[in-house]
Amino acid sequence: MGLGMAEGDALIAADSLVRADLEGNESHGISRLPIYVKRMKEGRISAVANINFEQLGSILRVDGNNGLGQVVAYRAIEQAIPLARESGMIGIFVRNSNHFGTAAYFCQQVCKQGMALIAMTNSPPGIAPWGGKKAFLGTNPLAFGFPSRSGPPVIIDMSSSVVARGKIILANKTGESIPQGWAMDENGVETVNPAAALRGAVLPLGGAKGYALALAIEMMCGVLSGAAYGPHVNNLYRDEDPPANVGHSFILMDIAKWMDMDDYFDLSDQLLREMKESPKASGTDEIFYPGERRSKEHTKRSGAGLTVPLEVVGELKRLGEEAGIAFLEGVRS
């Protein structure tokens, strides 16, 4: 807000970052705040999101005008929800945006409305083409969200890479090694050094399958939206880069338009119950569906509070000093 962001938009950004930490996804949590603030101060991200919307039948085209990704994506879906109530399904294509945090956050937003969502975004180069050694495609996540009546929503959120590049960025910040099998260096050799990995490429999920998935998402988010694609998506962490021009795409579905909601919940609850009750492998106490662990971790951490790496605490303190805002260490709200 000190940089000119409207209070409602600032709350969306803060909620997205803190929720990521509460759910155990620290790579997309408040450790991202310092780089967001730095780029807003420089004007590489617009604190004031002057978002433009254009509806063409069941398509909503969105120009984020370089706003913060969380705000642009949230407002785009917010604009599309009443349209989906009318038609049953809306395709949302966003250009001129930025890193938007976790795709799961927007799935949760929609599930609260009793609707379903498919969410995608491209990102700066992180994955090499299959057989190559230089990063070309983004790590491009794909997420699905389906509401549930008897438990947390079904939330599937995964990158096209073995691991989100943000985890490597966080490891580099904290001075930790990364596991074998996550990334390769600029010579195409696997590495456990996060700095070398950031100069190289993240390995795709499932080999050639992850590479193909990343390309499909690049088509959806970079080409069909009119945003940047592949190596033309600029990097938030590179000082010399211009605005990122990230693209997002969403498919928003109003389930009630094609089936009775009680029937939907009966069927989905039965599916999840039967799956959870299926025979367990040796050493497994419970079968979880995607979204359950995230919800359990959120509940646990909401009660116990968050442990933040000292490096991130130092950055937050410096941000507070620059903004004239006190940093209250160890205080719960």
Image (cartoon, rainbow, N blue to C red):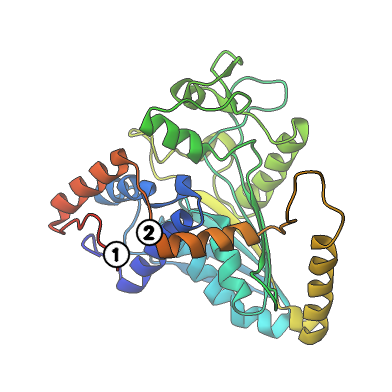
Q: Nearer the viewer, residue 83 or 57?
A: 83
Is residue 154 visible to the viewer in this orientation of the structure?
yes
Does residue 64 show up? no
Residue 286 is left or right of residue 230, and the answer is: right
Q: Residue at x 45, y 47 (%)?
A: 26
Name the residue located 20 percent from the left edge and 58 percent from the top edge: 328
Mark 2 to mark 1 CA distance (whole Å): 7 Å
Residue 229 in the image, given as x and y percentages of width and height: 58, 42
Image position of 231 with respect to 115: above or below: above
Label 1 sits on residue? 332
Name the amino acid type tagged 1.
Answer: Arg
* Residue 271 falls in image quadrant: bottom right
Q: Which residue is mark 2?
A: 305
Pointers 2 and 1 in contact (C-beta within 8 Å): yes
Q: Position of residue 140 (x, y in %)?
A: 61, 44
Q: Quadrant of the N terminus?
A: bottom left
Secondary element under disc 2, as helix, strand or loop, is loop
